[in-house]
Amino acid sequence: MKYLRNRDVLREILLSFVIGIICMVITYPLIGRYAILFLLLALVLAAVHYY
């Protein structure tokens, strides 16, 4: 389990969230409503990586 300051963790989660939104915007015309699943997956992967 990695020890990180809360600010660093929040910054990384926010970065992953932004990347997920960008990917969702790019892929939304292709896969439609399923794009939100990729955003949730990105958040889950970030949480698993840091916790």
Image (cartoon, rainbow, N blue to C red):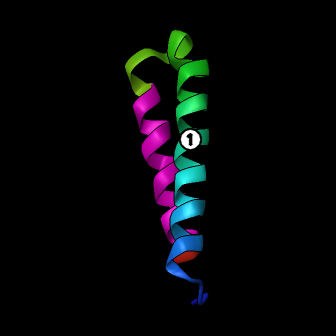
Q: Position of residue 43 (x, y in %)?
A: 48, 53
- Image quadrant in which you'd find residue 25: top right
Please report the residue visible at 53 percent of the width from the left and 9 percent of the height from the top.
Answer: 29
* Observer-nearest of 21 and 35: 21
Q: Residue tagged by mark 1?
A: 18
| Residue in the picture at 44% in, 15% down | 32
Q: Is residue 26 magenta?
A: no
Q: Position of residue 28 (x, y in %)?
A: 51, 17
Magenta range is: 35-49
Left or right? Give the position of 37 relative to 12: left
Q: Tell me the crowding category of disc 1: few under 14, some 14 to 19, or many 20 or more residues within 10 angstroms, Cα based.
A: some
Task: Note whether 34 is above or below 48 in the view shown.
Answer: above
* Residue at the farthest top position: 29
* 3 is higher (above) or lower (below) than 19: below
Q: Quadrant of the N terminus?
A: bottom right
Q: Is residue 31 above or below residue 37?
A: above
Residue under the image location 54 percent in, 72 percent down? 7
Q: Residue at x 59, y 90 (%)?
A: 3
Amino acid type, mark 1: Val
Residue 46, position in %: x, y?
Answer: 55, 61
Q: Helix, strand, or loop for circle 1?
A: helix
Instruction: State whether residue 16 is above or below residue 12.
Output: above
How far across and down, in percent of the image, does residue 21 sit?
52, 33
